[in-house]
Image (tube, rainbow, N blue to C red):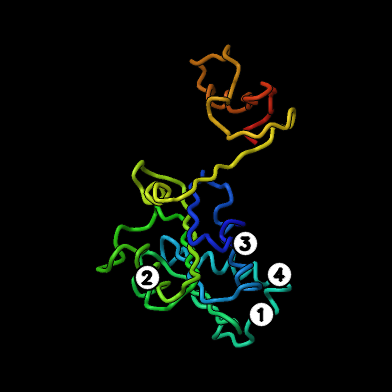
Amino acid sequence: MDAILEPTVESVCIRKGTQLGGSEAIYNVLGYIIDQDPAPALVVYPTIELARSVSANRIQSMIEASPALKAKKPSDGDAFTLQEMRFPTMSLFLSGANSPASLASRPCRYVLLDEIDKFPAFAGNEADPISLAEERQKTFWNRKTIKTSTPTIEDGPIMKEEARCDEIREYHLPCPHCGGYQILDFHNVKWPQDLDREDPAYPIRVRDSAWYECQHCAGRIEDIHR
C-alpha cells in the first residue's frame, strides 16, 4: 500500500497466498484515492457478477463506514450504483474481466486488478482484459496500477507480471522470541514425527500439532494453523 504512493512507482504486483489481505489492500488504496488523491479509477474482477457483489458487500460498505468517504458520497442514487460511483471529484468504475462492455473506453488514472490469474484469456472478441484495462491509462502521465493474485500455474499472469518487475520486495515477519525478521518458508514448519501415518486422521493431527520454527533461534511459534 505504501509502494503505490511512491512518486516513481507506476505499477505494483502482489503475488500472494490465499486469504492474506490482497483484496483488502486494494480497498485501502481505493479509500485513499477517493479521500486524498481523487482521479478516475477502475477496479476489475474476474467476472462482472463478482464485481457487483464486491461493490455491494465490501466497497460500498467501506464508504458507508468511513465518515471521510461517506461525506463524499453523492446524494443522487443514480450516481452511486454497483458499477459506477460518481463522487464530486472523481468517478469509480467496477468491471468484470469477462465483460468487454464494462471495460469500455473510459480514461482512468488508477487501474486496480484483483485475482488476475482467474481472468479469461480474452474479453469476448477483444484483447486480453489486462491490456484493455491498462489502455484506459494512456492519457495519464501519473498513472498507477495494482495487480494482485494467488498464482495458479507456473507461467500464469501474476508470475509473468512479477517477472517484469524492476524490484521485488518480500514480506518478512519478526520472531516473537528473538525478533529476527524472516520470510516464512514451508521447510520451517515442523510436526511430531511419531504420528501414525496410517491413521486416517493423520493430516488433521499434523495440522493440530504443527509449529513454525524460527530460522534464527530455532524457537517454536506455536499454533501456526490458527
Residue 39, image x, y percentages: 55, 76
Q: Amino acid at mark 1?
A: Lys
Quadrant of res 178: top right
Q: Nearer the viewer, residue 118 or 209?
A: 118
Q: Nearer the viewer, mark 4 or mark 2?
A: 2
- Mark 3: which secondary structure? helix
- Distance of mark 4 from mark 1, alpha carbons? 10 Å
Please give the name of the residue rendered at 27% of the width and 68% of the height, measured from the top-left corner: 126
Please give the name of the residue rendered at 58% of the width and 42% of the height, measured from the top-left corner: 171
Instruction: Answer whether labels 4 and 2 touch (C-beta < 8 Å).
Output: no
Residue 75, image x, y percentages: 64, 86
Dot 3: within a 10 Å radius of its alpha carbon, few (fewer than 14), some, or many (20 or more) residues?
few
- Mark 4: which secondary structure? loop
Which mark sits nearer the N-terminus, 4 or 2? 4
Which mark sits nearer the N-terminus, 4 or 1? 4
Instruction: Answer whether labels 3 and 1 touch (C-beta < 8 Å).
Output: no
Q: Which residue was labeled with disc 2?
A: 135
Q: Which residue was labeled with disc 3?
A: 28
Please identify the quadrant where the C terminus is shown. top right
Q: Amino acid at mark 3?
A: Asn
Q: Which residue was labeled with disc 4?
A: 66
Please give the name of the residue rendered at 66% of the width and 21% of the height, measured from the top-left corner: 218
- Distance of mark 1 from mark 2, alpha carbons? 28 Å
Q: Which residue was labeled with disc 1?
A: 72
Count of numbered circles on the image: 4
- Distance of mark 3 from mark 1, alpha carbons? 16 Å
Above or below — where is 49 with respect to 150?
Answer: below
Dot 1: within a 10 Å radius of its alpha carbon, few (fewer than 14), some, or many (20 or more) residues?
some
